[in-house]
Structure formats: structure tokens, C-alpha cells
Amino acid sequence: MNLTSRSIIPEPLRQLPWKILSALGLLTLFGSAVLYSAAGGKMMPWALVHMVHFALFLALAIAVSRVPRERFRQMAYPFYGVLVVLLVLVEAVGKIGGGSQRWLNIGFMNLQPSELMKPVIVLAMAHFFANLPPSMTRTWRALIPPGMLLAVPAALVILQPDLGTALAICFGAVVVIFMAGVPMWWFMAGGAAGAVAAPLAFFFALHDYQRKRVLVFLDPESDMLGSGYHITQSKIAIGSGGFFGKGFMNGSQSHLEYLPEKHTDFVFATMSEEWGMIGGLFVLFIFFIVLFRWGMGVSRRAPDRFSQLLAAGITATMFFYVAINMMMVMGLAPVVGIPLPFMSHGGSSMMTNMICVGTLMAIERWSRNSTSLN
């Protein structure tokens, strides 16, 4: 960058990771093209809104990136408390859609508080373990309080019911607990307990439609026109795309309305039919750059324990979105309603992911400031 550019562009903007933001912008434009095709060659109601959401929440991410580290820590528990209250309000007055009660109407958008809980539970966990003396990470104090912090929002989200989001909340929190250095045998004991509890939960805790999703995952052909319809059509769409795809605007599964949720949960299948494996590899490449090259790099370079745990948990949360959605549409995981970041239509999902990006940018800035002081 030349001297003229340096004098014109403010320092805070110059410090932003523009390569990463450009990659995410490119992925969002690609997602908008897929949504444009899914709508039959129309910008509304999905493609234009998708781009507007990205632009609005990019501004939010930049604002988040300027927040000082101490302010993050100060707001960890207040943010957690506010979202717990909002989750309770969802149960009381929330909007019902698709058989679940997940949203609050706040005028300009339908807010899904459970989406925001994904980064906030990571923030709360990172703050807790940053304050916990390392000598106590092998005692009950490293398990009981964070377990209670996690149980409350997870239970409220399961009641909506939204098993996929509840699992995402748990995943980010468990990654922070693991990275904090608690004894490995706790995780082994938890895995054994989960293996014992899983059959009981299947028969006594899951809703009927959730049990059907698990059975269909194990045998998709058992109910191809019923519970297995989503995954069957998704696999047809992905397989028919081949290596190069059928071409833009030529996806029969989405255009003929065979593929359900073609603009949200199954947008990757919509894309794969028209853009083929080439399109899928492009999406995977962007996520590899953002999550593994950048996200984990930010965690490794973080200047303190809090920042390291926060960056690792945030990166893991975004990874969970990507991994579960892609496994779901390919029949490698049960259908749980997890959107694909920067591709699926949805304001709450875009806002959550941009908050995650803004948080990683903030941690990167803390690292840079820490280096300059030393």
C-alpha cells in the first residue's frame, strides 16, 4: 500500500483482514447467485436480502472488532443473562415456524436468540476459565459451574424444539472446556455416559419427528416419500450435478420444487446440482482458508488465555455449522436444521457468523497491539 493510500484510509480500516473479508464476500455473492437461481431468476425474496444482510452485518463485525478485550470480558455474563431471558421469552411469546417456536419479532427481522447464544456461550466459558486458576482445572470447580452455564440455554433450546442448535451450543462450549485443560478422563466418562443415555433419550426424550430423522438417517430408503424425502432429494440433487454441474439456472430438483428448503438448510444441494463438484470444492476452499488458516491461526497467536479460548471456541462454532450442514445434505448425519454460513438465507444466521468473524478480528487486533507493546 502506497503512502497516498495510507493517508486516505483510516488506520482501523487498514488493519482489517481484507483478504478474509474478500473471501467471505465472494462466498456470499456465490450464495446469492445460488439463491437467485433457486427463486427462478429473481433477486427477491432471497438473493438481494442475502447481500443486504452481509453488508449490514459486516458493519456490525467491524464494530465488534474495535471492542477492547476488557469490555468483552465485562460483558460476557450480562450478554449471557440477556440471552437466557430472550430464550424464556421465546417460550412465552415466540413466533412459530416449521413446527418450532424459535423466533422473536423485533420489527425489521425475526430474531432467533438461540443463534446468538452460540458465540455468547463460548464467550462466557472463555471468561470463566480465564478467571479460574490453572491449579483448579482438575477439580469440580472446572466442571460444575460451566456445566450449569451450558445446561440452562441448552435445555431452553431443546424445548423449542431445536436439537441442531442445542448441539451447536454444546459443541462450542465443550471445545472451550477441552482447550482449558480439564482432565481427559472427564471427557471419556462423559462419552461413556452419553453412550448409555443415547438409547434412553431416543425412546423417551426425543420428539416423534426427531426419532424419525434418526431412523431415516440409518435407512433413508425406508420412507422415501415421508421422513426420508428431504435427504433422498438432496442426494439426488448432489449426485446429478456430477463434476461440472448442470449449469446455472438449470437445476431441476430445485426449480421443479422437488428439493425442500432449497434456500436454507439444503442450499448446498441446490448449489451442487448446478455447479457440481467444482462449486463444492470452491466452497470448501473458502471455509478452509477462513477457519483453519485464519481462525486457528488467530487462536495460536492470541496474547492470553482468555483470547486463546475465545478464538478456539468461536472457530469451532463456525466449523460445526459447516461440517454438520454438509454432512446432513449428503446423508452422513441426521437432518437437524443447521444452515450453511454465508450461503443459506437467514438474517439470524448471518448475524451470528459475522459476530464470530468480528470477534476473531478483535482478537487478532489484541495480538497485534500486544506485539507492538513488547
Image (spheres, grey):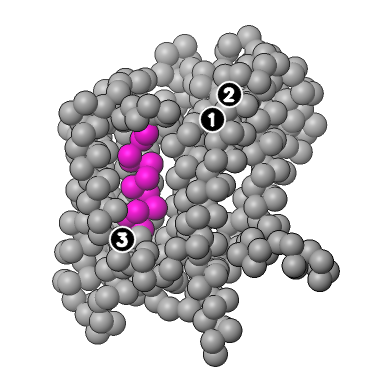
Three-letter residue code for mark 1: His
Three-letter residue code for mark 2: Trp
The reply to whether discs 2 and 1 touch (Cβ–Cβ < 8 Å) is yes
Q: Disc 1 designates what residue?
A: 345
Q: Residue furthest bottom?
A: 374
**C-alpha gap between disc 2 and disc 3:** 34 Å
- Magenta span dominant secondary structure: helix
**C-alpha gap between disc 1 and disc 3:** 29 Å
Pinpoint residue 353: horizontal percent, then vertical percent. Answer: 49, 47
Residue at horizontal 61 percent and vertical 56 percent from the top: 290
The reply to whether discs 2 and 3 touch (Cβ–Cβ < 8 Å) is no
Residue 187, quarter of picture = bottom left
> Relative to 81, is 51 on the left or the right?
right
Residue at horizontal 43 percent and vertical 68 percent from the top: 68
The quadrant of the picture occupied by the C terminus is bottom right
Q: Earlier in the sequence, mark 1 or mark 3?
A: 3
Three-letter residue code for mark 3: Met
Mark 1 vs mark 3, foreground winner is: 3
The quadrant of the picture occupied by the N terminus is bottom right
Q: Residue furthest top?
A: 256
Q: Disc 2 designates what residue?
A: 46
Q: Earlier in the sequence, mark 2 or mark 1?
A: 2
Q: Disc 3 designates what residue?
A: 75
Secondary structure of the residue carrying tag 1 is loop
Between 61 and 96, the one nearer to me in the picture: 61
Pinpoint residue 367: horizontal percent, then vertical percent. Answer: 53, 75
Q: Which residues are magenta?
A: 111-122
Mark 2 vs mark 3, foreground winner is: 3
Residue at horizontal 69 percent and vertical 50 percent from the top: 23
